[in-house]
Image (spheres, grey):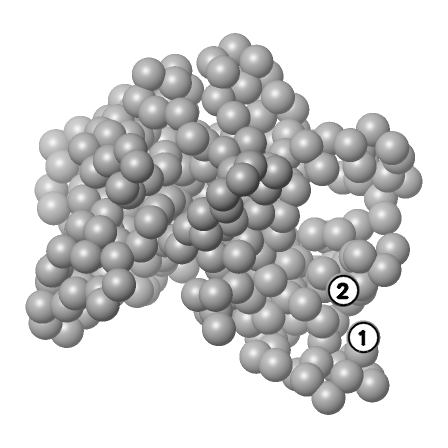
Amino acid sequence: MKNLLKTTVAAAALLAAGTLNVGAEETVLLWGDTHLHTKNSPDAYLLQNRSATPDDSYKYAKGLPVIHPYHKARIQIGTPLDFLVVTDHAEYMGVIPRIVDGDPLLLQTETGQRYNKMAAEGKILEVFGEVIEDANTQVANPDLNSEEINRTVWSEIVEAAERHNDPGKFTAFIGWEWSSIPNGANLHRIIFMPEGKSVADQFLPYTLFDSSKPEDFWDWLTETSEATGASFVAIPHNSNISKGLMFPTADSEGRPIDAQYARTRMRWEPVVEIAQIKGDSETHPALSPNDEFADFETYEHIIGSGEFAGTAEADAGDYIRSALLW
């Protein structure tokens, strides 16, 4: 069910990007995944995905055998996908595995040396806690957020997509995840584009350290699209744990949303993810008391640490059904 929902969203995203034409004589249904992390995502790496790379991900999607990062068995998908977007978190992308592997650039820093030592002592979850704290407070650690390391990792991701893209057979989209999480409120978006390396090389992924405000994120999409020709599509996900902020009635400054706000959001976010491993975002029993299926895979945990940790309370601004009714 989750894969079906994901790929339905993906098809809608392709349509919004102008790459599917429902008015054509022949319509082709394509199956794929728009939200996949590799070891380059801090959360995936720190939660035991220590080996899966973008190359592994594309190989698996294309039907080739790969080694599972957890149990190390050889695995192979039964039916290859038509497309895949590798969407690693932009924040500290690729940094943690490089620290653990002893990257000289990162081990020149105090934080790099400390994290390398903590990892060697089996304290990797404590590293994760610090990384989440940086995200919650929206303050980047300069030791982990240099232009040089960010450009190096992004170039490797772009090159992997270029290697595996096979027009007419398999599409390897270039993408990432903007992981805005102010005070533990999940405002994440998946971003991808149909263009390739020549366009992707012109920018670095937008991160929550640039801004955690959706309006600033949309402004960046507009400016970067105009400057590079990128046809971005952004997909909000896990609105169910957004503390009511994913579908607000006011903008980030507390002003009531207006027509321009709505037009801008519609341009960049034509679809939304309805189900994910961290729960269902359609509705909640507290919001749909007469729907016997409203308790489907509810998720109660805020993505936060320290003062930002806690239990999610159902809010109309968290759920897609409520947003559509507005």
Indicate whether 137 appears above or below 311.
above
Residue at position x 52%, y 64% from top? 5
Residue found at the far front of this picture? 25
Indicate whether 91 appears above or below 18.
below
Q: Could you tell whether 282 is left or right of 69 in the image?
A: right
State the image quarter where residue 287 is shown: bottom right
User: In the image, residue 227 lies at what x, y percent?
Assistant: 52, 11
State whether residue 39 appears in this view.
no
Q: Amino acid at mark 1?
A: Leu
Q: Could you tell whether 17 is left or right of 34 in the image?
A: right
Q: Is mark 1 in CB contact (under 8 Å) with mark 2? A: yes
The residue closer to the viewer here, 170 or 99, is 170
Q: Could you tell whether 28 is left or right of 170 in the image?
A: right
Residue at position x 57%, y 13% from top? 226
State whether residue 58 appears in this view.
yes
Q: Quadrant of the C terminus?
A: bottom right
Q: Which residue is mark 1?
A: 287
Q: Earlier in the sequence, mark 1 or mark 2?
A: 1
Q: Which residue is mark 2?
A: 321
Which mark is on residue 157?
Answer: none
Q: Could you tell whether 150 is left or right of 26 in the image?
A: left
Residue at position x 42%, y 40% from top? 176
State the image quarter where residue 166 is shown: top left
Indicate whether 277 appears above or below 13.
below
User: In the image, residue 9 lies at what x, y percent?
Assistant: 55, 53
